[in-house]
């Protein structure tokens, strides 16, 4: 017997990160107050291996066949939603989850989707009352000095001609004396970083500024970020820094590799692709990035091209791996001294029509099952003109979103 999926308009506009139900918060994708938030788990699955994106697509299609969908709202992001968080490397587990309840908001419209034949579930205001935890930080896979040595080794590989660019990541471990409140952390990230995509999928939580792919009907969009400078907090000084970033040969070189990798990956599936002549400077709360929005239209003759096909083609891009890709991945394994897990992997949502948004899991942390430990991550693009001390400072700046959010718990 088909499983009923019902979507109806909500009478009021909720603040997504500040609502709760009787079920555990399991997933979110929020930007500027709009997005989706999921509660409970109707179904979940782990995928890994060389065919993980195809396996995920197959599983989602099979699950959808079980549903009798009653959608009174329509539009992207309504009806049943699959939240995904793919590992960076195919050898590690990726997570798929279909929540029991999904609440969405876009502009002046809000809706709720639930699984089951019962009445509309009740939602309430999230209670954030909690004693603030005591946090302690420790080194991750590599110490600061060891990580700078890894950067130096990467620069040597680039200067020898083996690589054009490589992205090196690092981690830190956060220890808490009590369970971390995931919803408070989510609310803090949304408050401090409203221009990023705030995500949560199976204990991976963060605020990413980078959109790997958005598919809306046949229109494809990918936002590429590469080239970073830390903000000072002084408006005049930061404007000057933005100007220097836009003219920096080192950062423009890094950015060009990343944009080229995305455009090349999309071209077999798109009848037209638009790449702006020059990047713009994206201003975030703590850093500025060189950014380019690459767009395209899915080729009508590409009948089997779905969002999973595009994810598979785009990941890993030069923005999180390097150029050439295969040798950069091999070098990452040798130099980083840690497992990335789902850091720097595709994360986001896909609806029953095949529309969706997936970012790259950056500025994030993985919460342990007991909620008392958290691994936070950052990474930097290394090119011939990189300096290890500057890259360390950049990596520290990229840890700030998670560290500041944790400090407000």
Image: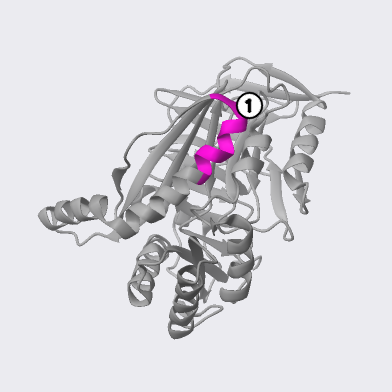
> Is residue 46 rendered to the left or right of residue 161?
right
Q: Is residue 264 magenta?
A: yes
> Which residue of the protein is positioned furthest toward the top in this rendering?
72
Q: Is residue 145 above or below residue 374?
A: below
Name the foreground residue: 164 vs 242.
164
Q: Residue at x 48, y 44 (%)?
A: 260
> Which residue of the protein is positioned furthest toward the left in this rendering?
236
Name the foreground residue: 48 vs 84.
48
Would you say residue 18 is visible in this rendering?
no
Which residue corresponds to mark 1? 120
Residue 298 x %, y %: 59, 24
Q: Is residue 226 magenta?
A: no
Q: Residue at x 64, y 58 (%)?
A: 326
Q: Is residue 232 above or below residue 118?
A: below
Span shown in magenta? 261-271
> Is residue 340 rendered to the left or right of residue 128?
right
Name the foreground residue: 6 vs 356.
356
Q: Residue at x 54, y 72 (%)?
A: 178
Q: Is residue 103 above or below residue 400?
A: above
Residue 349: name its quadrant: top right
Q: Is residue 264 above or below residue 363?
A: above
> Is residue 233 rendered to the left or right of residue 63?
left
């Amino acid at each position: 017997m088909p499983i009923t999926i019902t979507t109806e308009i909500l009478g009021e506009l909720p603040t997504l990160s500040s609502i709760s139900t009787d079920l555990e918060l399991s997933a979110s994708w929020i930007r500027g107050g709009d997005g989706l938030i999921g509660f409970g788990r109707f179904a979940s699955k782990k995928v890994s291996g060389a065919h993980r994106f195809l396996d995920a697509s197959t599983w989602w299609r099979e699950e959808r066949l079980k549903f009798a969908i009653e959608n009174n709202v329509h539009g992207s992001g309504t009806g049943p939603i699959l939240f995904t968080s793919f590992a960076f490397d195919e050898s590690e587990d990726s997570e798929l989850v279909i929540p029991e309840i999904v609440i969405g908001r876009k502009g002046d419209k809000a809706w709720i989707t639930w699984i089951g034949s019962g009445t509309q579930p009740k939602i309430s205001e999230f209670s954030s009352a909690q004693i603030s935890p005591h946090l302690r930080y420790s080194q991750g896979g590599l110490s600061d000095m060891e990580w700078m040595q890894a950067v130096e080794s990467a620069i040597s590989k680039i200067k020898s001609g083996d690589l054009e660019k490589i992205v090196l990541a690092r981690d830190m471990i956060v220890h808490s004396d009590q369970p971390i409140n995931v919803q408070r952390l989510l609310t803090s990230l949304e408050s401090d970083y409203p221009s990023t995509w705030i995500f949560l999928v199976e204990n991976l939580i963060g605020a990413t500024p980078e959109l790997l792919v958005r598919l809306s009907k046949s229109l494809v969009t990918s936002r590429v970020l590469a080239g970073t400078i830390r903000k000072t907090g002084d408006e005049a000084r930061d404007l000057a820094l933005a100007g220097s970033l836009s003219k920096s040969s080192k950062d423009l070189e890094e950015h060009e590799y990343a944009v080229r990798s995305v455009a090349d990956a999309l071209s077999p599936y798109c009848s037209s692709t638009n790449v702006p002549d020059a990047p713009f400077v994206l201003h975030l709360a703590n850093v500025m990035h060189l950014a380019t929005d690459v767009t395209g239209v899915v080729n009508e003759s590409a009948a089997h091209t779905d969002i999973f096909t595009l994810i598979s083609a785009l990941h890993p891009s030069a923005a999180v791996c390097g150029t050439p890709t295969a040798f950069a991945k091999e070098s990452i394994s040798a130099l980083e001294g840690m497992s990335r897990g789902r850091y720097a992997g595709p994360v986001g949502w896909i609806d029953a029509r095949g529309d969706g948004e997936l970012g790259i899991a950056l500025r994030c942390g993985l919460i342990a099952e007991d909620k008392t430990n958290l691994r936070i991550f950052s990474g930097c693009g290394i090119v011939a003109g990189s300096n290890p001390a500057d890259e360390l400072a950049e990596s520290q700046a990229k840890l700030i979103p998670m560290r500041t959010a944790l400090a407000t718990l």
